[in-house]
Amino acid sequence: MTRFYEDFTMTIDGEPATSDKTFDAINPANEKPIAQVPDASREQLESAVAAAKGAFPAWSATPLSERQKLVAKLGDVIEANTEDFIRLLTMEQGKARAGAEWEIGGSAAWCREIAKQELKTETVEDDGHRTVEVQRTPLGVVGGITPWNFPLLLAIWKIAPALVAGNTMVLKPSPYTPLCTLKFGELTRDILPKGVLNIVSGGNELGAWITQHPEIRKISFTGSTATGRKIMESASGSLKRITLELGGNDPAIVLPDVDVKAMAKELFWAAFQNSAQFCVAAKRIYIHEDIYDEMAEALVDYAKTVKVGDGLEQGTDLGPIQNSMQFDKLKNLLADSKENNHKFLLGGDIGAGPGYFVPVTIIDNPPEESRVVVEEAFGPVLPLLKFKNIDEVINRANNTEYGLAASVWGRDVSAARKVADRLEAGTIWINEIHTFSPHVVFGGHKQSGIGVENSLEGLAEYTNVRTVVTNRAAPTSV
C-alpha cells in the first residue's frame, strides 16, 4: 500500500495534527480496521478555530478571482488522485466502483463549477444624488459537519462555497468515514493559505463543541433530522446561521401509462442507489393498481440481476451498509415487518457476515401506518404501495414530516406535472431522479431541512447581506 492509505492526520493551521487518542476506521465489507484516526481534543478544536479566525481577515480580503482560482485547484488535486480516492472511498464507505467514481468525479467538478460563481453587488436605487447598494459579505468562521453516505462530495458542497464567499472553515467528517476527507485536507495544505481550511476528526463530543463554539458564525450540517434538531438548539445560544440538509422519506409515484419493463430498472436504481443510503432515494414507491402486479414482478426480476458484495470486488453493484449502528436499525426494521406479517417479495433475511450486508428487500403493499412506510429506512428495504386515484396518492405521499424530494413517472408529462405541482418537497423529478448540479438549488421542506445548497442561493447562505446607502448631497452649513 502507498502512503495514501496510511498516516491519516488532521489539518490545523495548514499543518498535520495527530492526537494521543484515536479510533478505528472500519471497512464495512469485512468489519476490519482500515486505519487509526485522530480523535481531536478540545484544545485542538480551539487551535483550529483560532487558526480559521486568524486567517479570515486576509482570506476575505483576497480578491474573489484569486479565491476562485484556489478553489478550482482543489478540484484539480482531487482529479489528480482519482484512483486513490476511489479505492479509499470504497474501503471506508463500502460503495461499489461506479458509485465511487460518481462521487470522486463529482467532487472535482463541484470545486471547479462553484469556483465560477459570484454574488455581485446589486444597485437597487441610483438617482444621481443617492445610491442604495446591496452587498454580500462573508460571515467569518464556518463550521461544517458531514455525513457518512457521500463523505467527500458533501464535504465539498460546503467547503467550496464557504471559501469562495470569503469565509474560513473548520470541518468535521463523520467518524464512520473520515479518511477521504482527512486525505483531502492533507492535499490542500500546499494550495490554500494556512488556517483557511481546517479538518478535525472525532465523534459526537467534537460535533457538540463545534456547534456551541462562540467564534463559529455558521454551521452547515448534512445528516439526520434528529441530529439537525439538536444542532439547531445548540446553535441558538449564539444565534449562529445554520444550513441543515436533513432526512427524507421520498415518495415515487408511478402512473398507469408507464412502460413497465423499461421502468423497472429506473425505479430500482431510484430506490437502491448507494444501497439506498441516500437522502433522496425513492423510499416509498406508489404504483397504480392497474400495473401494480406487473411492476412488482418486473422490479423483483431486475433486482435478482444485481450483485451485492464487497465494493472492491469486480462486478459488485451494491455494497454493504456503512456502519453497525445503521445495520442494527435495519435489522430491527425488518424484524418489525416480519412480526407484522408483511409479505416479502424479495430478501428480508440477513446472513451471518462478516460485513454489514443487507440483501435487497422488497415488501408487498404493507399498511400505510407501518414502520417500513413511515420511517426513513436508509438502507435497501423498499415498500411497494398500491393506489387507485391521484388525490389519494398525493395525500398519502404528502402525509409525512419530511419534504426533501419526490419523483413522478409517466408517459403523459402534462399529467405527471400536475401531480408534481401538488407534492410537498424541495426537489421533484419527473421521469428522472438523482440529478444534481452546482448551479441548481437543493434544499428540503418541512423537517427535511433549513436553508439550501448549490446555486447562487446556496453560495448566498455563506454570506451576510449588507446595505450601503450613499447620499452624495452631503449636508452643508448655511
Image: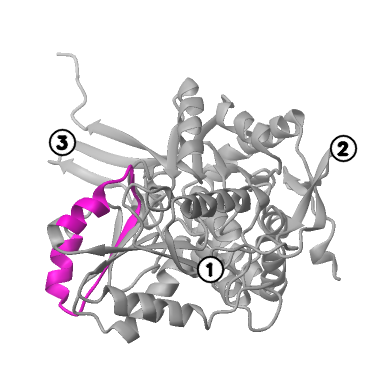
In the figure, residue 392 lies in which quadrant? bottom left
> Marks 1 and 2, how far apart in space?
44 Å
Quadrant in the picture for the C terminus: top left
Which residue is tagged 1? Answer: 347
Where in the figure is residue 238, as x and y percent of width and height?
48, 22
- Is residue 398 rendered magenta in the image? yes
Q: How many labels, in total?
A: 3
Near-viewer residue (130 or 377): 377
Identify the disc placed on residue 20.
2
- Is residue 159 rendered magenta in the image? no
Determine whether 159 is above or below 389 in the image.
above
Residue type marked 1: Gly
Is label 1 or label 2 in front? 1
Q: Secondary structure at mark 1?
A: loop
Mark closest to the chain's N terminus, 1 or 2: 2
How would you rate the neighbour count of disc 3 (Cα within 10 Å): few for under 14, some for 14-19, many for 20 or more? few
> Marks 3 and 2, how far apart in space?
63 Å
Q: Secondary structure at mark 2?
A: loop
Residue type marked 2: Asp
Q: Which residues are magenta?
A: 392-420
Which residue is tagged 3? Answer: 129
